[in-house]
Structures are given as structure tokens and as C-alpha cells.
Amino acid sequence: MEESPEQKYLWLKRSQSWVLYWLNRLPTALEVLFLVAIIRLLENTPVGRTFITWLGIQSFLEIIESVSILVAVFIYFKEGPERQKRSRYEAWKVIDAAHGRRNSYARIQALQDLNEEGISLRGLDAPKADLREINLRKAMLLNANLQKADLLEANLQKADLRAANLCRANLQRANLQKADLRAANLVEANLLGADLENVNLKAADLKDAKLRAANLKGANLLGANLQGTDLRIAEHLTPEQVKAARHWTEALYDPEFMNQLGLEPRPDVPPTELFFNG
């Protein structure tokens, strides 16, 4: 007895529901493979060919097979945000797992990956971390805790380090061009040879910090604490910059620069130690 159009429709609806139920539980890659396998099965078996003829959709199946790759590409891009979300979650897991450890290459890579995606690293807690040569250009590191971190030759150009804790951090030869270090804690930080061109150090605490041979061209030192700061052989430093800071008379300078500032030689700093001590 030949089925009525209504019976065919109900059968197809029930079959569709069953297929979708299981497809929703399959990985995306298997969905496409499953679709192609079903097409081949229907095309290459007598039962399949009879079924296709009964449904009258042979041409439709041929179209599906021909665009299966496009379907896979579409699904790939559709799931892009979800994959990106999982990737970011895994990166943060790596960073959290490395907390308290000094060395972790995976942490460096995870931080760089997140920053390249424009993800904020605000409040990053990585004290004493070995982050040498890390590339965090334009990173958002507001309120980050990088106390005693090793940032030797790190790229922090244009990074936002406002109110960051960099106390006793190693920033030797780091690139801090145009970085924002307003109100940052740089007490006893090592900035020997660092590039601080056009950096904003407004209200930063540079007490006992080492800035020897650092490039301070255009640096904003307004309200910065220069008590005990070592500014000997600093490059492109001007008296105007220095006098905009607090406790500037208590910093260490070259004898010639001290004359420009109208200061008398410091009796507690022997001349032989002006370039080599500390």
C-alpha cells in the first residue's frame, strides 16, 4: 500500500528529529563526515537508491555533497568565537597555574597571546616572575603586581602601567617608550639603560631607583619622587624635567649636571663612585 504524502511527511519529521538529536552530540568535524557518509551510503546501496527514489531528492543529495566543504568552512567560522573563548580560558589557566613560580615559558606565551588579542591584563599578579624579553607592547597592565619581576629587555612600549607595583623590578634595557607609569611604584627598580622616551612618570615613586644611562628624552617627571634616584649619565635629561619632580635635590647626578641644577657636590658620594657604585 502506497504511503500518503502526510505519512511521508510525518516519517521525515520523526527521522529529522532523531538525526538532529544525535548530531547535536557529535563534534563539528564528525558532523560533516557523518553527512558525507550518509550520502555515500544512499548512493551506493540498492536500499539507498530505492530510498532516494522514494523520496525523490537525489539531486538535493548531490548538491549537499558538492558543498560539504563549504558547510565545514561555514561551521568553522561560526564556531570561531567559541574557540577563541576556550583559547583565552586556557591561556588564563596557564597564567594562574604559574602563580608563585619564577620561571614559566608557557606563562610568557600566554600573556603575549592575550595581549595580541587586545585582552586586558589589568591587575595581573606575577611577582618575582621571569618575564625577560616579553613583548607586551600596548598592554593594559593597570594595577599590575610585578614586584621583583625580571623584565630585562622587555617591550613595554605604550603599555598602561598606571599604579602598577614594579618595586625592585628589573627593567634593564626595557623599552618603555610612551608608556604610562603614572603613580607607579618603582622604588628600588633597576632601569639601567632603559628607554624612557616620552614616558609618563607623573607622581611615580622612583625612590632609590637606578636610571643610570636611561633615555629620558621628553619624560614627564611632574610630581615624581626622586629621593635617592640614581640619574647619573642619564641621556637627554634637562633641569626643567628634574625640577618638576619632588625631592629632586636628593637624587644622584653627574657633577656637570649638578652645576646646571645649581647644586653643590654631594659629600656622601665619592667622585670615584659616581659611575660605578650600585
Image: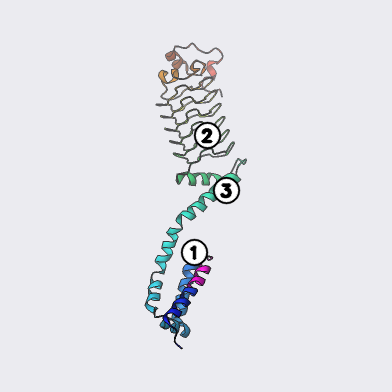
**Whole-percent x, y for residue 232 in the image:** 48, 22
Secondary structure predominantly adopted by residues drawn in magenta: helix
Q: CB of mark 1 within 8 Å of CB of mark 2? A: no
- Tag shown at residue 93: 3
Q: Residues within 10 Å of mark 1 (few under 14, many from 20)?
A: some
Q: CA distance from mark 1 to mark 2?
A: 41 Å
Q: Is residue 188 magenta?
A: no
The residue depicted at 44 percent of the width and 87 percent of the height is 2
Q: Which residues are magenta?
A: 16-28
Q: Secondary structure at mark 1?
A: helix
The amino acid marked with disc number 2 is: Asn
**Residue drawn at the location 49% of the way across and 69% of the way down:** 20
Q: Secondary structure at mark 2?
A: loop
Picture residue at 50% right of the left edge, 35% below the top: 142
Q: Earlier in the sequence, mark 1 or mark 2?
A: 1
Determine the secondary structure under disc 3.
helix
Q: Position of residue 53 (x, y in %)?
A: 41, 83
Distance from Cα at disc 1 to Cα at disc 3 = 25 Å
Residue 26 lies within the magenta run: yes
Using a 10 Å C-alpha cutoff, classify the residue at mark 3 as few (fewer than 14 neighbours), some (14 to 19) or many (20 or more). Answer: few
The residue indicated by pointer 1 is 28
Q: Amino acid at mark 1?
A: Thr
Please name the residue that numbered disc 2 is placed on.
143
Mark 2: few, some, or many residues within 10 Å (few <14, many ≥20)? Answer: many
Q: Amino acid at mark 3?
A: Lys
Residue 64 vertical position relative to residue 113 in the rendered view, above or below: below
